[in-house]
Image (tube, rainbow, N blue to C red):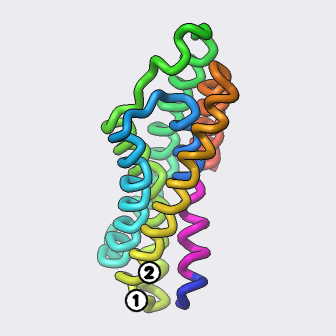
């Protein structure tokens, strides 16, 4: 597998993380720590999961793949529904009061990277060099999430209170897609 193929794979894998980053930065008041952690967590987990899938091989692949959609649905569905609810019931004075926590960010990073585990199994099947591939996937996701921070912040400022509603809808759509 060549560099450009791996970059394209990384871009494809990063899209859930990008959507979640945009939703987070639109809807939540993010401290500097969370802004730094968002691309680091998403990139780190997207790079770690193919390694785990590669080395676990066929042992756990079918088990994790069987429950990946449900886990993603539960985590992102809960966070998205909560974000949507807060957006619908809040007033202009309460915009930005919700804070993104490290725990929530950690759970989102796991939920958005579970599909990368299956990619690791696939990379084993084609005998790809897993360490460079995982590094490229991690770097690609990091850069995409970093760009998404700025996009989400910009739209969040313009949308105001509606940002939580929009962010919640994005997370709910990703959650539903995960089980379909």
Q: Residue at x 42, y 48 (%)?
A: 38
**Does dot 2 land on a helix, a strand or a loop?**
helix
Find disc 1 in the rendering and name its residue.
129
| Magenta region, residue range | 6-16
| Front one among 39 and 85 | 39
63, above or below 130, in the image = above
Using a 10 Å C-alpha cutoff, classify the residue at mark 2 as few (fewer than 14 neighbours), some (14 to 19) or many (20 or more).
many
From the viewer's side, name the closer residue of 87 and 119.
87
Closer-to-camera residue (67/96): 96
What residue does disc 2 label?
Answer: 133
Q: Nearer the viewer, residue 25 or 109?
A: 25
Q: In the rendered view, tell whether residue 161 sits above or below residue 41.
A: above
Q: Residue at x 50, y 38 (%)?
A: 76
Does residue 167 show up magenta in the picture?
no
Residue occupying image coordinates x 62% and y 31%: 156
Label 1: how many Cα within 10 Å (few below 14, some 14–19, many 20+): few
Asked whether the residues under the numbered discs 1 and 2 touch, taking CB atoms below 8 Å apart as contact, a structural biologist would say yes
Above or below — where is 172 with respect to 56?
above
Give x and y (percent) for residue 120. Answer: 43, 74
Q: How far across and down, in percent of the image, does residue 11 sit?
A: 59, 67
In percent of width and height, residue 58 lies at 37, 76
Reply above or below: 113 against 91.
Answer: below
Local secondary structure at mark 1: loop
Q: Quadrant of residue 61?
A: bottom left
Q: Position of residue 145 (x, y in %)?
A: 52, 54
Residue at the location (48% across, 31% down)? 79
């Amino acid at each position: 597998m060549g560099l450009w193929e791996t970059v394209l794979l990384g871009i494809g894998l990063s899209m859930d993380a990008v959507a979640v980053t945009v939703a987070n930065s639109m809807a939540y008041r993010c401290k500097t720590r969370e802004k730094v952690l968002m691309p680091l967590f998403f990139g780190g987990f997207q790079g770690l999961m193919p390694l785990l899938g590669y080395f676990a091989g066929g042992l756990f692949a079918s088990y994790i793949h069987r429950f990946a959609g449900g886990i993603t649905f539960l985590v992102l569905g809960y966070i998205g529904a909560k974000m949507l609810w807060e957006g619908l019931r809040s007033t202009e004075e309460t915009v930005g009061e919700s804070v993104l926590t490290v725990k929530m960010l950690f759970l989102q990073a796991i939920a958005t990277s579970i599909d990368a585990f299956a990619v690791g199994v696939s990379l084993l099947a084609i005998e790809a060099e897993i360490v460079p591939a995982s590094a490229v996937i991690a770097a690609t996701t990091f850069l995409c999430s970093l760009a998404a921070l700025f996009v989400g912040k910009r739209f969040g400022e313009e949308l105001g209170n509606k940002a939580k509603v929009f962010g919640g809808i994005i997370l709910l759509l990703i959650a539903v897609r995960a089980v379909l």
